[in-house]
Image (cartoon, rainbow, N blue to C red):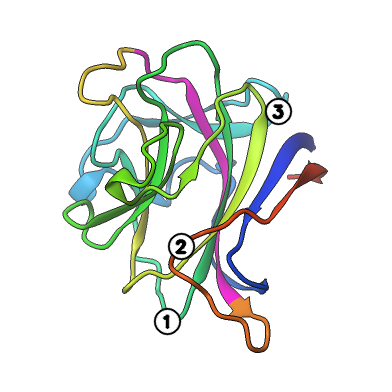
Amino acid sequence: MLKKIVIIALLVAPVAFGNVTFSDNFENGLSQWTGKNGGAHTGQIVNDPLVSGNHVLNFGSNAAGGDVFTSELISHEKGPIILSFDYLGIPGLDSNGGGFVGISYTDGSSNMWIASDLPYNGSFGLTEPLADDGIWHHYSIVIDPAQDFRIMIEDFNNYGKDPIAGNAYFDNITVTNAVPAPGALILSSLGTGLVGWLRRRK
């Protein structure tokens, strides 16, 4: 199955992808996910609006503070990891909220938001913008968690300013160990690397 996406590799130094420690393409339900503190969530598997036969993550309601979390802690040894995912944001539905991706150390009480479709310019720890242009984009972001963590995702409600849910879609989420090139230094701030086109088989 082919998916046309934009590649946005956000790497701060020469790195390679190492061992995969988590992966989900949402073709087998949401068995790897749960709500905050193991509770309810509004995550749902829906048909890809652009690719027939593909299934993706979407949300039935807006949330703040995380909606779905990986059920199990993702083991993290010392050193950076690469969080990769595909994101599709539908343009024109709202301007106050949408897709958020981050990591949680304790199911929400200690969060680090990483990417969003809102231009927060660093607020909440956000580092990378997500595009709401009706096209699938692939993001690969280098981060260095402090400990074992969970991935958290939501369709942000911006504290009541965004009444529309369902405008953010996610697919192909993976976590891999980042392998620095000899002599490379991984910094805490992120920079833009490669931007290009790819036709990718899921």
Mark 3 and mark 1: span between their CA atoms? 37 Å
Mark 2 or 3, closer to the camera: 2
Counting residues from the start of the chain, the first of labels 2 and 3 encountered is: 3
What predominant SS class does the magenta segment belong to? Answer: strand
**How many neighbours does mark 1 have within 10 angstroms: few (below 14), some (14-19), or many (20 or more)?**
few
- Quick check: marks 2 and 3 in contact, CB under 8 Å? no
Taking depth in this image into account, of 3 and 191 the one nearest to the observer is: 191
- Secondary element at image label 1: loop
Q: Is residue 160 above or below residue 110?
A: above
Amino acid type at mark 3? Gly
- Secondary element at image label 2: loop
Q: In this view, does 44 lie above or below 149?
A: above
Mark 2 or 1, closer to the camera: 2
- Location of residue 52 in the rendering, given as x and y in whole percent from the top left corner: 73, 24
Q: Using residue 198 as the reference point, say whether residue 57 is left or right of it.
A: left
Region rendered in magenta = 164-178
Amino acid type at mark 1? Glu
**Which residue lies under the disc numbered 3?**
53
**Which residue lies under the disc numbered 2?**
189
Taking depth in this image into account, of 17 and 40 the one nearest to the observer is: 17
> What residue lies at 51% left-to-right and 59% top-to-bottom?
190
- Location of residue 195 in the rendering, given as x and y in whole percent from the top left corner: 73, 47
Taking depth in this image into account, of 132 and 189 the one nearest to the observer is: 189
Q: Using residue 68 as the reference point, say whether residue 18 is left or right of it.
A: right
The residue positioned farthest toward the bottom in the image shown: 182
**How many neighbours does mark 2 have within 10 angstroms: few (below 14), some (14-19), or many (20 or more)?**
few
181 inside magenta stretch:
no
**Which residue lies under the disc numbered 1?**
77
Q: Using residue 149 as the reference point, say whether residue 10 is left or right of it.
A: right
